[in-house]
Amino acid sequence: YDNQNRIVRVTNNYNHSETQFSYSGNTVTETLIYTNGGFDTRICQLNADGYIESITDYQYPEDLQLYSYKNGYLQEMHASWSNDQWIYNWDNGNLISISEPIVWDTRWDKTITYSQVTAVPININIDYIEECPEFQFFGFMGKQSKFLPKKSIQKNETDTITKTYEYEFNSNGTISKILITSVGVGESNNGTEYYSIELVY
């Protein structure tokens, strides 16, 4: 982080990559540096609340993503490569469902149910922690859910993936570990997988 508590660098020990963030006014530039020396750069414009309203790929400027919010909560994302959009539905401060556009002739719909457990506020969005797209992960995509999710169900025409979440906490109330069980059923059945995400502050 920098002296304004903004994320400036993320290192990934799994694939030895590094992501750098730089700031200029209402613009954030994300550069992903690969081990072979290659890189990808995305230019992001922020709205007045500090949330991303557009992302442009530096190498492929025709690739554009547009985001809209309501009361600080992400509502829609539209990408230039799709005639459809991602729809985000909220209830009482929690993200309860995501409807994705049709990609490769299929559509994924995801529903999320919540515990009544909260964590000490941290600048990550728990709803996206598995996929870890950096901007969602570090709070650039609007408010995060009020409670911690306990289950998500993701479906398309042939497959269902059900994930359950358990949490371990530090003494100050921050999350130390997330334990995830994933059960896949259908044509692309991956069976049952168990994994954990450890958070280090």
Image: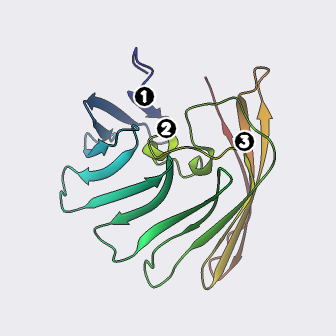
Q: Which residue corresponds to mark 2?
A: 138
Contact check, label 1 and label 2, Cβ < 8 Å? yes
Q: Residue at x 60, y 79 (%)?
A: 156
Q: Secondary structure at mark 3?
A: strand
In screen coordinates, is 32 left or right of 107? left
**SS at circle 1:** loop
* Residue 84 at x, y percent in the picture: 39, 76
| Disc 3 residue type (three-letter) | Ile
Q: Residues within 10 Å of mark 3 (few under 14, many from 20)?
A: some
Coordinates of residue 184 in the picture (x, y in percent): 71, 71
Q: Which mark is residue 96?
A: none
Please tell me the numbered disc located at residue 7: 1
Residue 178: numbered disc: 3
Residue drawn where x is 26% and y is 60% of the image = 64
Which residue extends farthest top? 3
Q: Marks 2/3: CA distance? A: 17 Å
Q: Which of pointers 2 and 3 indicates the residue nearer the eye?
A: 2
Q: Position of residue 53 (x, y in %)?
A: 34, 50
Q: Nearer the viewer, residue 178 or 115?
A: 115
Compare marks 2 and 3 and give the one earlier in the sequence.
2
Q: Residue furthest front?
A: 71
Task: Give the residue type at disc 1.
Answer: Ile
Kindly report the distance in space between the C-alpha atoms of the residues bearing marks 3 and 1.
22 Å
Give the residue at x 60% y 85%. 157
Dot 1 or dot 2: first in sequence order is: 1
Q: Is 64 drawn above or below residue 179 in the view shown?
A: below
Left or right, 63 with respect to 98, comes to: left
Could you tell me if the residues under marks 2 and 3 are in contact, i.e. CB atoms within 8 Å? no
- Looking at the rendering, which quadrant does residue 148 occupy? top right
Which structural element holds mark 2? loop
Q: Indicate the position of residue 189 as horizontal and vertical percent values.
A: 67, 75
The quadrant holding residue 50 is: top left
